[in-house]
Image (cartoon, rainbow, N blue to C red):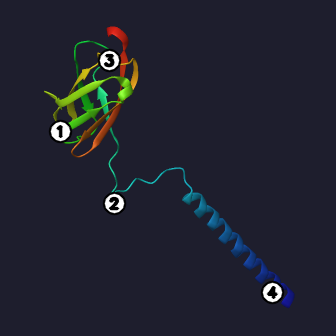
Amino acid sequence: MQYSSLARLSGSIAAGFVTLALTAAVAAAQATSTTPPPSKTAAGTVAPAACTVKFAIDSVPSSATPVVLNAALSVAIGDSAAVSFPSASGITASVGPAATGGATALQLTLNTSAAKPGEWPVALKGKTGDCSGKIKIVAGGK
């Protein structure tokens, strides 16, 4: 009789270890999920999505005369902003508020006279945030 009680006890202990092992495996799988957690700021709040900039046209010609572009931002970045391009692009620019579009619209004036053809990153830095995007320069007004 003691043998059968010992066998049942041993079976119960084995079942407990199996349950514990399965629980640990599920917890480990959840901990290594491929979905990244939302980014947090230093204050512990969820950080806003990255701001992007889009232009009303697909490409800009290299030109001796300045090219004026309207830019739409996905998020307002403040009432003033600075614009920058990689020096290798040959693009220089200034930025100001757009006539229409509110806080998420800017007007860029590009000097593309020395611009190299290609797709170039553009960065806008405002008082309350930064935006990034790309602009395509084509040779000779094409």
Mark 2: give few (<14), some (14-19) or many (20+) Cα within 10 Å: few
Q: Earlier in the sequence, mark 4 or mark 3?
A: 4
Q: Quadrant of the N terminus?
A: bottom right
Q: Residue at x 35, y 42 (%)?
A: 50
Camera-side residue: 62 or 43? 62
Q: Quadrant of the C terminus?
A: top left
- Which mark is in front, 3 or 1? 3
- Sequence order check: which comes first, mark 2 or mark 4? 4
Return the x and y of residue 97 as percentages of the image width and height: 16, 31
User: Circle 1 sits on which residue?
Assistant: 80
Instruction: Out of 124 and 63, give the one closest to the viewer.
Output: 63
Q: CA distance from mark 4 to mark 3?
A: 90 Å
Mark 3 and mark 1: Cα distance apart in space: 26 Å
Where residue 101 sits, quadrant-wise, is: top left
Task: Evaluate if marks 2 and 4 touch, with contact meaning CB atoms under 8 Å apart.
Answer: no
Q: Residue at x 80, y 87 (%)?
A: 5
Q: Residues within 10 Å of mark 4 (few under 14, many from 20)?
A: few
The residue that disc 4 covers is 5
> Is 25 above or below relative to 122?
below
Give the labeled residue for mark 2: 42
Q: Residues within 10 Å of mark 3 (few under 14, many from 20)?
A: some
Tag 3: amino acid: Ala
Does the residue at mark 3 contact the one at mark 2 (Cβ under 8 Å)?
Answer: no
Q: Disc 2 residue type?
A: Ala
Amino acid identity at mark 1: Ser
Q: Amino acid at mark 4?
A: Ser
Residue position for label 3:
114
